[in-house]
Image (cartoon, helix red, strand yellow):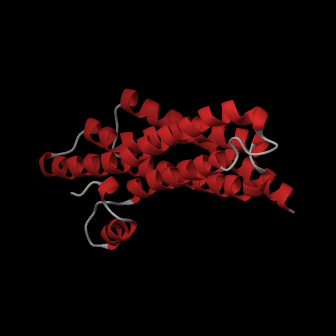
Amino acid sequence: MNKAQSMTISEWTDALSSAAPIPGGGGVGALLGVLSACLASMVGNLTVEKKGYEAFSLECEKLIQKANELRNRLLQLIDEDAIAFEALMKAWKTGANDQAYANASEPAARTIHEIVTLLDILNVFKEKGNKNVLSDVGVGACCAAAALETSRINILVNLRYIGAPNVRKEFEMLLDVLIPEGIKRARDLMKQVERELQ
């Protein structure tokens, strides 16, 4: 298995299009988060130290750093999802248990937490960032919402095989609380951007 970070976009999408089971939907969810984080960084870099935004520069630099850290963690989650699914496929041969399915869901769960943090950054850039790239904040929010929706599906596909209440609890909290709240925040941000662009 090739690491996503060492592959070109063309190579990774060729792999995604192939008959191989990995990369798959979980990697796509993390990639959507990567794209959102990239847009957040771009907006920050087009704002920092620009005329009219000097008072925001110090905070902006910190937000760029956070967005870059999120991007790197989400990139890593593309590979971690592939590794987790590969392990689940091996477990199928011997009888996968609750923990095997939970492990396969963990990259999606971590993606959700990273996206929630990323939405905080996008919201600040919507309020204080360079208005010439406001549309990119909106696209970042679109990608964030899609990453959350994708992660929900990737958890649901495994959760149906998990019977132990203590194992299910963490994932059900994500499905019932964190994901809906995150999607609402992302969509609200998209609507705010759309209103300002009209």
Between 25 and 49, the one lying in front of the other is 49
User: Residue at 71% across / 43% down in the picture?
Assistant: 125
Residue 96 locus on image (x, y percent): 21, 44
Residue 46 locus on image (x, y percent): 67, 50
Residue 171: image quadrant is top left
- Using the image, determine if residue 175 lies above or below residue 192: above
Q: Is 107 displayed left or right of 2 in the figure?
A: right
Whether residue 81 appears in this view of the structure is yes
Residue 76: image quadrant is top left
User: Residue at 45% across / 55% down in the picture?
Assistant: 31
Residue 172 locus on image (x, y percent): 49, 36
Between 91 and 192, the one lying in front of the other is 192
* On-image quarter of the N terminus: bottom left
* On-image quarter of the C terminus: bottom right
Tally the numbered discs.
0
Whether residue 116 appears in this view of the structure is no
Q: Is 135 displayed left or right of 4 in the figure?
A: right
Residue 118 locus on image (x, y percent): 58, 40
User: Residue at 61% across / 51% down in the picture?
Assistant: 42
Q: Is 50 displayed left or right of 45 in the figure?
A: right
Between 98 and 1, the one lying in front of the other is 1
